[in-house]
Amino acid sequence: MYWQVYYHPVSRAYETILEKIYLRVKDLCINHFDFDANLDALKNIMKNPNDLDSYIEIDDYYMNGLIASFTKSKDDILRTLADDFLNRHIWKYIDDTKENEQMIIDISNSFDQDEVKYFTAHHTVSNSAYQDDNMHFGEEIQILLKDGSISKLKEQSNIIKGLILTGVKEDPKFFYRKK
């Protein structure tokens, strides 16, 4: 499910656009940009991440309305990001590998200095099917064997042994807005 839905590159590209909207809003707030929308809840969270009342106010309805208002922003970058998000202009992506290094450089260089921060991103996701870190002793599963002895699940299950040996899977991608 993770690799086919949550970690799918298209889902990650869409998530990247949302992250870049937040980044642009934060940067504009720092520079005292005059927004045409009420950002009080977001500003409160930026000042105090433990502000529960503001956190509760920031729901899907609030964010979608805010992003919709950004499509009319005086800031070109924020307006573009909001339009991409709402109209599902999903960004392109390529594997972030040594073989694609020059292509990534060329794509990055096609944006001006301000744009590259908001219209490109390097993201790697990783997932381990089973992690045996011995840090969570209380979570360790013990098995009572027929002879009355106790053994760890990982010592008795070929499936768990196989999952441990598969290690961590990673998927590095470079995301970018198509011009």
Image: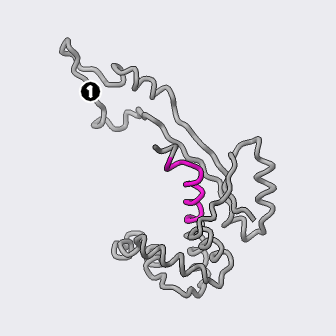
Q: Position of residue 102 (x, y in %)?
A: 81, 49
The residue pinned by badge 1 equals 142
Residue drawn at x 77%, y 41% is: 99
Q: Find residue 44 and report its horizontal and vertical position in percent.
A: 44, 78
- Residue 86 is situated, as x and y percent measured from the top left of the image, at 56, 70
Q: How many labels does the image show?
A: 1
Colour option used: one colour
Residue at point 75% right, 42% down? 98
Q: Which residue lies furthest to the top in this view?
A: 147
Q: In which quarter of the image is residue 51?
A: bottom left
Secondary structure character of the magenta stretch overall: helix
Residue at the location (55% across, 88% down)?
A: 36
Check if residue 41 falls in the magenta segment.
Answer: no
The stretch in magenta equals 5-19
Amino acid on which disc 1 is placed: Gln
Give me the residue at 66% from left, 67% from top: 118
**Relative to 89, 131 lies left or right:** left
**27 vs 18: above or below:** below
